[in-house]
Amino acid sequence: MLWRRWRLCVGWFKRWAAWEFWPPWLFYLPLLPWLFLLAVRYRGVTVVTAVNPGITRFGRFLVNRKSAKLGALPRRYVPPFVLLRAADSLAVRLAQARAFATEQGLPVVLKPDIGGRGSGVWIVRTSEELEQDIALVDYDVILQSFVDGEEYGIFWVRHPGRRRGRIVSITRKDLPSVTGDGIHSVEQLILSHPRAVCFSRLHLRNLGGRALKIPASGEIVPIGELGTHSRGALFHDGRASYTKELEREFESLTSSLEGFHFGRFDVMAPSVSALQKGEVLQIMELNALGAEMTHIWDSQLGLRNAWRTLRWQWHIAYHFGYCNSLGGAPVATFGETVQELLELWELHQRHEAASSKRAAE
């Protein structure tokens, strides 16, 4: 018990010592002067909200629905999904969920229709879990078919004055895991692992009773299900995966998104070779203004590279927003921006509350 407490303390300390685990408010704090200069240069703090006028029509400036963004993409790129509205009765939502699971099969992915950073995203593997999970949520969610394969984050930009866009960032995502030795439990392996210990409280909460099992020697045990850095996934710079074929495929993919200039696609591919050929790509999410070029979280690239990349990213966003505003695209007021940020925060709290209830069951 004493060793367990000590390792939990070590995990807490390492989260503060390693920059890639810093909380967002600390990580982004040094970027505030740069954002202020951009606001001055482009004559407005909120001009950046005009970066994607085509996405704005799916909600507001920041609060955009996943279901609407995915629904705007060519169907061949998007795994089937269904929207479950909180305004409908539980009986209606359960009927929709059962019908979707019967048609598409399990597992399925349940995710908030509005949200981010993996909050409230669950892999639902059984009919019993499906019933319980639908009853837990009091906000709009989508159920999406589960897609196996390798996960990538691909950031794409197109200047408002140009016809063609380009890929500026590729990230390969690996789910966290530990390797069994036939002696120690999954919990002990997590607490002993140099990286997994940093997310030990999260992993142990999500694993529940499975953390007490002793895996066989050499057995690879997944301890996370989501390709989200803040949930323990490992991110690697994937620029070596870039090909002209992949960029042409994204040019075709984005051609149907009028008014889309800036954002990241979370993509599943059967293999890196399939990704490079632009084959059998499945878009799990499209993240717009709030997206990051996620290769910055490759710890080998360093903190300076992360900040330098983000400065460049926000420069692009402000420049595109300014160009679009000159063309008549709507710009959020300061009050609208604050209101939407507060709404996102309130939704995030509800997502986390539902996740805590799910882990406790």
Image (cartoon, rainbow, N blue to C red):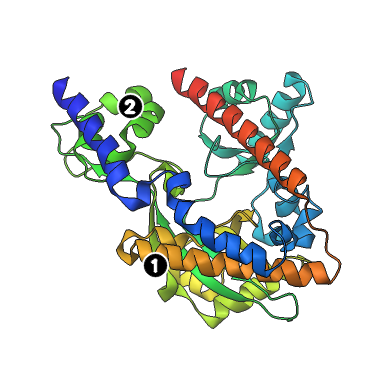
Name the spot of residue 19 as percent of width and height, x first: 34, 52
Residue nearest the observer in this picture, 275 or 288: 288
- Disc 2 marks a residue whose amino acid type is Arg
Q: Is residue 241 above or below residue 76?
A: below
Q: Residue at x 71, y 63 (%)?
A: 51
Residue nearest the observer in this picture, 233 or 333: 333
Q: Residues within 10 Å of mark 2 (few under 14, many from 20)?
A: few
Which residue is under mark 1?
305
Q: State the SS at label 2.
A: helix
Tell me which corner region of the image, top left, top right, bottom left or bottom right, holds residue 217. Answer: top left
Q: Identify the image quadrant of the N terminus.
A: top left
Q: Is residue 191 above or below residue 326?
A: above
Name the spot of residue 210 as percent of width and height, x first: 33, 26
Q: Is residue 57 above or below residue 143?
A: below
Total marks placed: 2
Which residue is under mark 2?
210
**Left or right: residue 154 compared with residue 23:** right
